[in-house]
Image: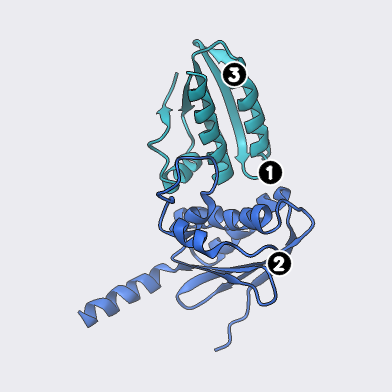
Chain colours: A cyan, B blue
C-alpha cells in the first residue's frame, strides 16, 4: 500500500487524513501537505487522522514533530486523530507518545 | 559449528525499496518463530537501519549498495547490515543508544538509532572492513531468555 494524503475541514478543524505506509519514501508527501496547510488554514486546529496508517517509521514521526512545531509557531493546535496501533507503537518506542495531543475523535 | 547466512541480499540504496525490505524481515522473523509483537518491532528497526544507511552513509544517493545478511543462531536472530558509505559518528551513536540525547531539544529526526537500540537486544556499530559501516543487530529468542534466567537463578 502506498501513501494517500487527503485534506478537508471538519468541525472547524483542518483534517489531514493519511492512509497507507509512512516511511522515508512517502513521508515527504505528508510533509508537503502539512507545510502547505498549517500556515494557510483559517482553522485553529490542525488534526492529522492516522486511523488508516498501516506502518510508520521515524521519518513519519519526525514529520509529525515538524508539524507540531510549525503549528505552535502559527499559534494553532496540532493533534493526532485516532492513531492506528502501528503509529502508537513507534511513538511509544520513540518516547514521544506524551508529546502529542492524541484524540480518539474530533 | 560454522554458521552460514540463511539469506543475504544486496539492494540499491533507494527509499522505494524499503517496503520490500520490511516484507522480507517480516517473513524471515515468522520463519524464525519470533512473536508478532517482536517481529513488527524488528521490521521497524531494520527499516530504520536501512534508512540511516541511505540518508547518512550515502547522503541520499540512491545508486549505492546496502547488504543485509540474516541468520538464526542458537539463541538469537542476527541481522547484519553493511554499507560502503561515510563512516557513522560512533560517539553520536553511543549518545543515542541510551535514549534521546539530553542535550538536544525536541527536533524532527535523529530517532533512528534510538529505535534500533530499543528494539534489538544487542546492537553493534563498527566500521566496515575496507570502508563504510557494519551494523550487527541481534534479537534474542524466547527460549534463550528463559535459559539465561535459569542460569542466573542457579548462579544466585
Q: Which residue is mark 2?
A: B84
Q: CA distance from mark 2 to mark 3?
A: 41 Å
The picture places residue A70, in percent across and down from the top left corner, at 54, 27
- Please state which of the two labelled residues, at mark 1 or mark 3, is closer to the viewer: 3
Location of the N terminus of chain B by quadrant is bottom right
* Dot 3 alpha-carbon crowd within 10 angstroms: few under 14, some 14 to 19, many 20 or more: some
Front residue of A4 and B131: B131
Res A25 label: 1
Vertical order, B115 against A84 (above or below): below
Vertical order, B57 against A65 (above or below): below
The picture places residue A20, in percent across and down from the top left corner, at 62, 37
User: Label 1 is found on which chain of the structure?
Assistant: A
Which residue ends up furthest to the right in the rendered image?
B63
Q: Are marks 1 and 2 in contact (CB under 8 Å)?
A: no
Vertical order, A40 against B45 (above or below): above
Numbered disc 3: secondary structure? helix
Q: How many marks?
A: 3
- Please state which of the two labelled residues, at mark 1 or mark 2, is closer to the viewer: 2
Q: Are marks 2 and 3 in contact (CB under 8 Å)?
A: no
Numbered disc 1: secondary structure? loop
Q: Which residue is mark 3?
A: A39
User: Label 2 is found on which chain of the structure?
Assistant: B
Amino acid at each position: 500500500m502506498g501513501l494517500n494524503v487527503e485534506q478537508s475541514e471538519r468541525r472547524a478543524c483542518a483534517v489531514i487524513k493519511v492512509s497507507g505506509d509512512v516511511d522515508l519514501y512517502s513521508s515527504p508527501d505528508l510533509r508537503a501537505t502539512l507545510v502547505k496547510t498549517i500556515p494557510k488554514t483559517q482553522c485553529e486546529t490542525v488534526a492529522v487522522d492516522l486511523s488508516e496508517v498501516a506502518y510508520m517509521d521515524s521519518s513519519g514521526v519526525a514529520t509529525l514533530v515538524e508539524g507540531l512545531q510549525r503549528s505552535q509557531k502559527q499559534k494553532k493546535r496540532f493533534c493526532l486523530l485516532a492513531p492506528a496501533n502501528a503509529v502508537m507503537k513507534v511513538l511509544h518506542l520513540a518516547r514521544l507518545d506524551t508529546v502529542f495531543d492524541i484524540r480518539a475523535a474530533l | 559449528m560454522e554458521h552460514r547466512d540463511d539469506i543475504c541480499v544486496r539492494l540499491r540504496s533507494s527509499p522505494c525499496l524499503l517496503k520490500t525490505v520490511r516484507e522480507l524481515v517480516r517473513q524471515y522473523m515468522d520463519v524464525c518463530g519470533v512473536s508478532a509483537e517482536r517481529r513488527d518491532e524488528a521490521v521497524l528497526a531494520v527499516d530504520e537501519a536501512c534508512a540511516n544507511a541511505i540518508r547518512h552513509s550515502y547522503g541520499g544517493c540512491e545508486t549505492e549498495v546496502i547488504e543485509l545478511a540474516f541468520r538464526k543462531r542458537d539463541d538469537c536472530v542476527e541481522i547484519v547490515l553493511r554499507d560502503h558509505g561515510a563512516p557513522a559518528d560512533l560517539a553520536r551513536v553511543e549518545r543515542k543508544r541510551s535514549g534521546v540525547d539530553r542535550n538536544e531539544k525536541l527536533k524532527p529526526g535523529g530517532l533512528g538509532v534510538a529505535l534500533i537500540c530499543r528494539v534489538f537486544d544487542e546492537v553493534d556499530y563498527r566500521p566496515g572492513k575496507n570502508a563504510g559501516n557494519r551494523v550487527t543487530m541481534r534479537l534474542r529468542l524466547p527460549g534463550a531468555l528463559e535459559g539465561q534466567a535459569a542460569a542466573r537463578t542457579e548462579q544466585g
